[in-house]
Image: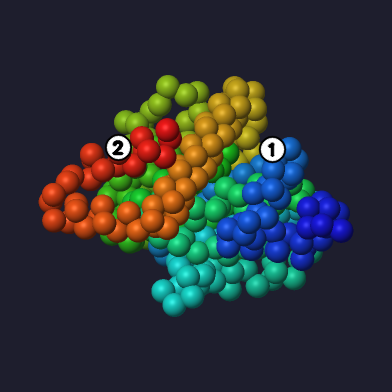
Amino acid sequence: MDIVAELLSGSRRALARAITMVENECHEAAAMMQQLYPRTGKAQIIGITGPPGAGKSTLTDKLAKKYRQLGKTIGIVAVDPTSPFSGGAILGDRIRMNELILDEGVFIRSMGTRGSLGGLSRKTADVVAIMDAFGKEVIIIETVGVGQSEVDIVKAADTTVVVMVPGLGDDIQAIKAGILEIGDIFVINKADRADAERLNSELEMMLVLNQSELDWRPPIKKTVASSGSGIDELAAAIDEHTNYLNKSGELERKRRLRANNELLSLIKEGISRYVVNRMSVSGQFNSLVASIERREKDPYTIANIILAECLR
């Protein structure tokens, strides 16, 4: 039985192997994804993002347990910082979800960012698709926690939950930096802290100023993830947003944009790999880089020449 058949039959081991193949860019990965793709598009994809120390992992853990109580199967993609030694994930997020690891209805995969600056690994979309094809009903993506640059999650998730915490001292800075625009739901975690009401007021004010043309106005929910307080209300808000997406046609628009981004990403990746491989064999690439370094030629002209040769 090949890996696709094993995966579709419910083998968790095959699921893990398939994800590893994608991460390691094995030759068989593209053919595998081609077979799995028609079986995707059914899962509810939730993104959890926010600054470091906001309690994203604990919130993800409690939210996953809530969905398990409702009888749903869960996939969790925990994007961790990359180890400078192995290139793999440091696994900090998975450590906080020990109880879930023992649950057969939950599959957790930690991924390193591997140099990606948007809070997600470059292979996150493929891993989500594999979990979707496997039959996971809810897939939660938890970003690495890089604060102001982690806006890529909006391209991967149906519902983006932005987690903030009072007392970090950079509340408004985080809001100004673009995170405000990507949130479908805002969560003030560790809401038992003294500054929670002040942060709530600041968020309310910023959301009023940033009101979009869409009918959905992002709600603000308060949680204390460590005790489970507010998790039911958060899950209800996510379901409410999912209903809005379905009724308004916004889900279709989001997934069309996602398909567009995935296609462009694959094209860029393929062209880049082809160019580098082709020119590395001849040694031409290094000589062109040297000519740019000596200011004999400029990188714009060289790039146009390379593309013209490769696409001829």
User: Relative to 63, is 264 on the left or the right?
Assistant: left
Q: Estimate how packed mark 2 is, as few (under 14), some (14 to 19) or many (20 or more) residues with alpha carbons within 10 Å.
A: few
Can I make out residue 202 in this image? no
User: Relative to 217, is 251 on the left or the right?
Assistant: right
Which quadrant of the view contains residue 10?
Answer: bottom right
Residue type (three-letter) at the residue carrying disc 2: Asn
Q: Estimate how packed mark 1 is, as few (under 14), some (14 to 19) or many (20 or more) residues with alpha carbons within 10 Å.
A: few
Q: Position of residue 225 (x, y in %)?
A: 55, 61
Which numbered marker is on residue 105?
none
Q: Which residue is mark 2?
A: 304
Chain-order first, disc 2 or disc 1: 1
Total numbered badges shown on the rendered structure: 2
Q: Is residue 77 above or below residue 41?
A: below
The quadrant of the image that shows the N terminus is bottom right
Q: Which residue is mark 1?
A: 41
Q: Secondary structure at mark 2?
A: helix
Which quadrant of the view contains residue 312?
Answer: top left
Are circles 2 and 1 on residues that touch, CB within 8 Å? Answer: no
Q: Could you tell me which residue is drawn at 47 percent across and 70 percent down? A: 87
Q: Could you tell me which residue is drawn at 18 percent across and 45 percent down? A: 298
Task: Look at discs 2 and 1 and give the one toward the viewer.
Answer: 2
Viewer-proximal residue among 42 and 246: 42
Q: Residue furthest left?
A: 295
Can I make out residue 88 in this image? yes
User: Relative to 89, is 239 on the left or the right?
Assistant: right
Q: Position of residue 99 (x, y in %)?
A: 69, 71
Residue type (three-letter) at the residue carrying disc 1: Gly
Q: CA distance from mark 2 to mark 1?
A: 38 Å
Which quadrant of the view contains residue 116?
Answer: bottom left
Q: Is residue 210 above or below residue 147?
A: above
Viewer-proximal residue among 196 and 79: 79
Q: Position of residue 21 (x, y in %)?
A: 64, 60
